[in-house]
Structures are given as C-alpha cells and as structure tokens.
Amino acid sequence: MRRLIGKSVIILAMIVVSLSPVRSDAAEKRGMDYFDPKYRAEIEQVEEYHLGKETFWKQFNSKQYGYALQELKFALRYFPNHPKHCS
C-alpha cells in the first residue's frame, strides 16, 4: 500500500510539474537535451545535487513532498527529457 501511494505521489508530482510554468534566471540553460554528450557535466551535477539519495529521495522518503517536488522541478526544468524522471 505504501509503495502504491509513493508511486501515485510521484506521478502526481510529474503532472503538476508538466502543467506548471517554468521560470529561471538561467534561461539559456533550460531545456538541455539529456542525450547530448556536451551536457554530461551538467547532467552529473543535477543528478548528484538534486536527484540523489541525500536530496530528492531523502526528502521524499521523509514525506517532505514539497521539497522533493522542488528538486524534481529543478531537474526537469534543465533536462525535460530526463529518462529516469519522465517515465
């Protein structure tokens, strides 16, 4: 039951993210292609500092869904086609 609720929250978060307007000071960096090798360094930073065990998953597992959602929004703002978080 907990896993079903957790998956439902992730799906809901993804829907909210996809419907939310995206604003960023670094507009030139938004919308980078996950599969383009020239962005490898940026992908590693986003995954380590925003989607890692100590950020997104720690917040998600401790039911701090607002903070977890902010991390997810950040990652999808810069890599909207991130395969781990768009499926």
Image (spheres, rainbow, N blue to C red):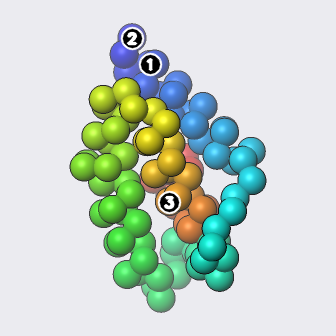
Is 79 above or below relative to 62?
A: below
Is 63 above or below relative to 58?
A: above
Give how far across and how far down residue 20 sits, in percent: 72, 47
Q: Is residue 81 visible?
A: no
Q: CA distance from mark 1 to mark 3?
A: 23 Å
| Residue at left offset 37%, top offset 54% | 51
| Residue at left offset 50%, top offset 48% | 70
Q: Nearer the viewer, residue 52 or 21?
A: 21
Q: CA distance from mark 1 to mark 2?
A: 5 Å
Question: On residue 75, which mark appears?
Answer: 3
| Residue at left offset 60%, top offset 77% | 26
Q: Which residue is mark 1?
A: 4
- Dot 1 lies on which element? helix
Q: CA distance from mark 2 to mark 3?
A: 28 Å
- Dot 3 lies on which element? helix
Q: Which residue is mark 2?
A: 1
| Residue at left offset 38%, top offset 21% | 3
Give how far across and how far down residue 82 sits, in percent: 52, 61
Identity of the residue furthest to the front in this view: 25
Q: Kindly indicate whether the residue at mark 3 contacts the one at mark 2 (C-beta within 8 angstroms).
A: no
